[in-house]
Image (spheres, helix red, strand yellow):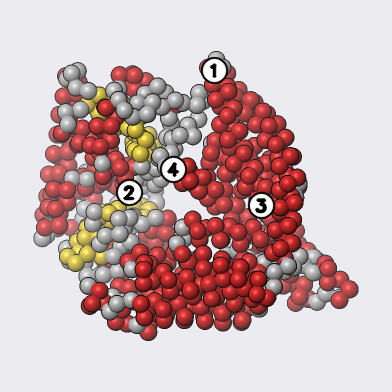
Amino acid sequence: MNIKDLLVKDVMIMDLQATTKQAAIEEMVDKMYAGGRITDREMYKQGILDREAQTSTGLGDGIAMPHAKNKAVKEATVLFAKSSNGVDYESLDGQPTYLFFMIAAPEGANDTHLQALAALSRLLVNPDFVAQLKKADSPEEVQELFDRAEKQKKLEEQEEQAAAANDSTKRFIVAVTACPTGIAHTYMAEDALKKTANEMGVAIKVETNGSEGIKNRLTAEDIAKADGVIVAADKKVEMNRFDGKNLVNRPVSDGIRKPSELIELALSGNAPVFHGSGTDASSEDSSAEGSIGSRIYKDLMNGVSHMLPFVIGGGIAIALSFMIDQFMGVPDTQLASLGSYNEMASWFNQIGGAAFGFMLPVLAGFIAASIADRPGLIVGFAAGALANTGGAGFLGALIGGFLAGYVIILLKKVFSGLPKSLDGIKTILFYPVFGLLITGGAMLLINVPMKIINDGLNSFLLGLDGTNAALLGALLGGMMAIDLGGPINKAAYVFGTASIATSLAEGGSVIMASVMAGGMVPPLAIFIATLIFKNKFTQDQKDAGLTNLVMGLSFVTEGAIPFAAADPLRVIPGFVVGSALAGGLVGGMGIRLLAPHGGVFVALLLSNPLMYLLFIFIGSVVSAFIVGMLKKPVAEAA
């Protein structure tokens, strides 16, 4: 595929005027529409925004590749745009973006936009080429640069293949590159490794696990003769084939930033020797290296992220059942059946209860699956179900998920000596049966003390009122603002969601209400601060303030991260004080909430919506004034 043919001169922007991400996207989409490359401006722009919502296409090093594939696109096109001053595009490295490649592909296209991304990524890994693009003055010059670069790239690849085939004296390594989206970083790491290996006089073969599938797959012969293996990946790849080889396992970003370090380590003989699990599944060691704490956190978040849709959907359905009964009326003698007294309320209650019933099994199942891959899923589900029926609750399911995952890891080691002909039967018979029996038996014992702890914790939470509830609410609200979506924030949030299951009969959880209030304050405080303290923020930050209003009202705490990252010592203390104040006021007033998410959109599901919103407003104003007073004026800070 020739990139030059997709780079249409009529839709190039040689001097992008936008200074914000949203404005840049709109300016490029307008150019696409004016150039007749798309038929529906809004449909195509929504496709771009949907892709950005997954993760920023600002790749770092001043480059962004927004892309979309939908019905609005008439013909595959790559729009090139250049900004002289740089745009805050929320890039992965946090730096301004100067070069943009907006890729549009028709809905029926053969993954044209993905192929374009891959080809572009391979060229843009060359810093000299990027520097030339930044200096280009005309569309014709841009096309000429790409045409020359593509021809040079093909010539280099042919020379590399010929040299590798004729030179058996070079040391040889193999590598695998992969990123979660399987687009740019996968191929940028491939090119960085190839280029550096060539400079070091090392032969290399790189397999890419990208959006187009596995390309340049490593053969058994390649692996056998390799002096070392590099896996630069942020997702699971097939690992057991590397059994017995010195293997360097790093994030894909290291493949781009530190290729020489990875190659030297792979050839040194000091890299750890990889030992496979003896199954055809991807090894549990195939993720990027990390500390024990980071692995536990990753496993826990895998369970929580899969659990949340059940809690959110089920919680809101049950909350609606309470609202329906309150609206339609329930006799005083039947208040105990609130939420299921009227037929319609009963329907919503049953639907929500069904979703809630999966909460603990899903939590435990996906924790176990994160640890031990697919064989851990069934055992984890069973452990969560036993924790649910045994009264061990959320904490029991948490323990059950980790127990199930590590039991399967143990079984993999136990059965690793069996003949290879039994590999298939291990996954469908040995792991589920023995894993279920061992984990299930352990859970029956664990449930006894965990039920006592769970009942005690529930009694404590349900008995909270006044000062005690205010203190706990302040603590959890403050935790939501400390790292804005990090481990501390997630710990408070998980604690809040766990409390919902034990507070259904009471009409909701005070803990969850305090947590959500604390999480809404930081972005709302930023919005207020940018309005009041105009000299303390840049124009880009003021523009982002309006975005934070929407995020705050929606309970998206992460909207305040750029402001905290830019000036943490002056911003985070204000966030923590305001969030703790809001959480403490909510807890002290005993306001309850059944929905674990939604912000103002679930206000009617609160026991006292008006008071709740007032407390959030108070916390946000206090936080905004602290942030505004601590921050320096823009000119002085610069």
Across and down, in percent, residue 222 comes to 32, 22
Q: Does residue 172 sit above or below 367 in this rendering?
A: above
Which is nearer the N-term, disc 2 or disc 1? Answer: 2
Say which mark, if any, is on residue 291: 4
If you read the primary sequence from the N terminus, does the residue marked by circle 3 or circle 1 appear first?
A: 3
CA separation, marks 3 and 1? 37 Å
Kindly identify which residue carries mark 2.
Answer: 113
Instruction: Mark 1: give few (<14), some (14-19) or many (20+) Cα within 10 Å.
Output: few
Label 1 secondary element: helix
**Of callouts 4 and 3, which one flags the residue occurring earlier in the amino acid sequence?**
4
Q: Which mark is residue 473?
A: none
Residue annotated with mark 1: 417
Q: Residue furthest right?
A: 333
Residue under circle 3?
394
Q: CA distance from mark 2 to mark 4?
A: 37 Å
Q: Nearer the viewer, mark 2 or mark 4?
A: 4
Q: Amino acid at mark 2?
A: His
Amino acid type of the residue tagged 3 in the rendering: Phe
Q: Position of residue 476 (x, y in %)?
A: 56, 66
What secondary structure is found at the residue carrying circle 2?
Answer: helix
Residue 332: x %, y % from top left: 86, 76
Are the residues tagged 2 and 4 within 8 Å (C-beta)? no
